[in-house]
Image: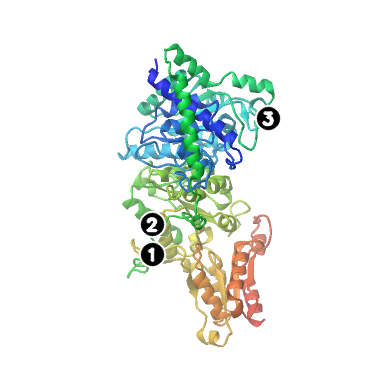
Amino acid sequence: MVDTEILEKAYRLMCMAAEMADTYERNRNICKYVHSTSRGHEAIQLATAFHLRPGDFVSPYYRDESLLLGLGFTPYELMLQLLAKAEDPFSGGREYYSHPSYRGPDKPTIIHQSSATGMQVIPTTGVAQGIQYLEKIGAGNGPSVVVCSLGDASVTEGEVSEAFQVAVLKKLPIIYLVQDNQWGISVSAAEARAMDAYTYAGGFPGMHRVQVDGTHFEESYTLLREVIDHVRRYREPWLVHARVPLLGHHTSGVRKEFYRDAQDWEAHLAQDPRPKLKTRLQERGVTEIALVEDEVKATVAKMFADAVAAPDPAPETVTDHVFAPTPVTEETGDRTPQGGERVMMVDAALHALEEIMEDHPEALLYGQDVGRRLGGVFREAATLAEKFGDHRVFNTAIQEAYIIGSTVGMSALGLKPVVEVQFADYIYPGFNQLVTEISKACYLSRGKFPQQTVIRVPIGAYGGGGPYHSGSIETTLLSIKGIKVAYPSNAADMKGLMKAAWLDPNPVVVLEHKGLYWSKVPGTDAARQVEPAKDYILPLGKAAIALEAAKEKTAKGDSCCVITYGMGVYWAKTAAASLDGRVEVVDLRSLFPLDEALVMERVKKHGKCLVLTEEQATNSFAEALASRISRACFAWLDAPVDVLGALDLPAVPLNMGLETAMLPGPEKVVRRLSTLLEG
């Protein structure tokens, strides 16, 4: 039997949620930003919240304001987010209502997440996986529980399946709280879902599952206590499927009268959890219900007035928290130790990770085929699992979304995962997590949740790799704001940039050209370099002059510079060998941040510039960079800035003759540079 005091607390908060919803509806001209309320879902949300502790994690979805009230957030705090005010404790006016992120000693942690239509399930499952790892190494903080809340309509998202697979495979301490109101905006359950979440969960052996009347507070409270206690004790996943009504609009903009008929509305209204709980209180002899209702109305009115009067964010703060400050700002350590051996680029990356993992137990490595049996399809992780154990270096399924998105949860725990997408062409299923979750988290949480993530991506074409193993993706990556992109072209840079990427508290994608891993492509032997010492770190955003032009040629104005990266460095250097000292080659090394200062300095010095890329040139990063160079260096240019890239084909063809015809190469670079120099 649930204590009457708890029932009274729940009823008070239900009244609060209802009065908040009514207040927002009465003040639509003030509550102008889109929002949803929890009306109809209050009982299951409060029942869940009341059992969570500081040290737990919860990921609410956009209809979970009652869950937030149950955790101890005040209506005033929630209203600050509703009205996008500067003092909004979650995002400072950057996020929608009921899109929280919180880190503090008094409540469960709420990682930043997107609009929570299924995408939040992967990051939150990543939290549970991170907790499991910390417990394994003896660094856990008690038997923490993770709750991921979502609507039943969002369970049809493919990413939810990826998360469920991992949860049952790894036996993670997570509860998926599915609130089913039979609607997905205007789409009914009958027309969109072959089964509900409870039935669906039956297809994942090891997922405990249960259904509950989510309008009945006592039943929900008792059940959630049992489920949460089980997860604390046995560390196994659960799905709780709660049936609830939708007693409001989908959102303030998509209103119920647009798509719901009177019969549906009346059926839902009959299941309102608040009158049900009021009746239970009356049966227990509670007599001051009307006083509570009046007090709540006065409290909500006062808090709403205060929130309306609160200041808006200052416009000058709009660029704050795009990135967290990185500790790596200068090149440090010994790049070329005396007596050092030349190593291949693939080994430089391997040794960098080995040194990181030796010193940092928070470092993990996972992805397809990186584990003990193979150590990566390029042997780029060979021996690491043997040395550090299968709990730190492990394989995943074919789940690019999970590989990338789970790092959000890991990072929130202070872990620093390095993950691998096997080929650049395979990254696209993971782009949703990279764009929606990872890139935005630091900015929208006002710096509370920077994403400490390194994503390794073998990239590029050589030797007949074919359409799905040869693509270039840098332009697509660089369209995402909030991530950094490194692209080393030799072993020394690879090791230094990998160290910097791992130390950076922000997400970094490291693009690693497959053709440079072993220097098998003619003209790329210089990618093998003396391996830097363990202490060597190369900051992101620092370009280098890979080849200098002859001073006398430059003095006469008879020189040009090639701005490039990756394989382009070697195409340019090979081409330069036949152009009599007239060509300088600048290796960008990082694509974002970009060393614009060095680029512009060298272009101004030479007056002629070719931007060289392996990507298809049209609408590429290279073309955008050429435009920036043209604007910044216009007065110094002797010729238009030129761009050379691959032909505009949808894929790299398998036949090596066709591959060569598509790509830029030394011969094409020579012809283009000759035209530029003689122009």
Q: Residue at x 51, y 17 (%)?
A: 276
Residue corresponding to mark 1: 531
Q: Amino acid at mark 3?
A: Glu
Disc 2 + disc 1, Cβ < 8 Å: yes
**Percent position (x, y) of residue 300?**
48, 33
Residue corresponding to mark 2: 351
Residue corresponding to mark 3: 257
Which sits earlier in the primary sequence, circle 3 or circle 1?
Answer: 3
**Does 443 appear above or below 601?**
above
**Percent position (x, y) of residue 392?**
38, 44
Q: Amino acid at mark 2?
A: His
**Percent position (x, y) of residue 634?**
61, 76
Q: Secondary structure at mark 1?
A: loop
**Does 215 appear above or below 185?**
above
Disc 3 + disc 1, Cβ < 8 Å: no
Label 1 crowding class (10 Å Cα cut-off): few <14, some 14-19, many 20+? many
Q: Amino acid at mark 1?
A: Glu
Q: Is residue 231 left or right of residue 318?
A: left
Disc 2 + disc 3, Cβ < 8 Å: no
Q: Secondary structure at mark 2?
A: helix
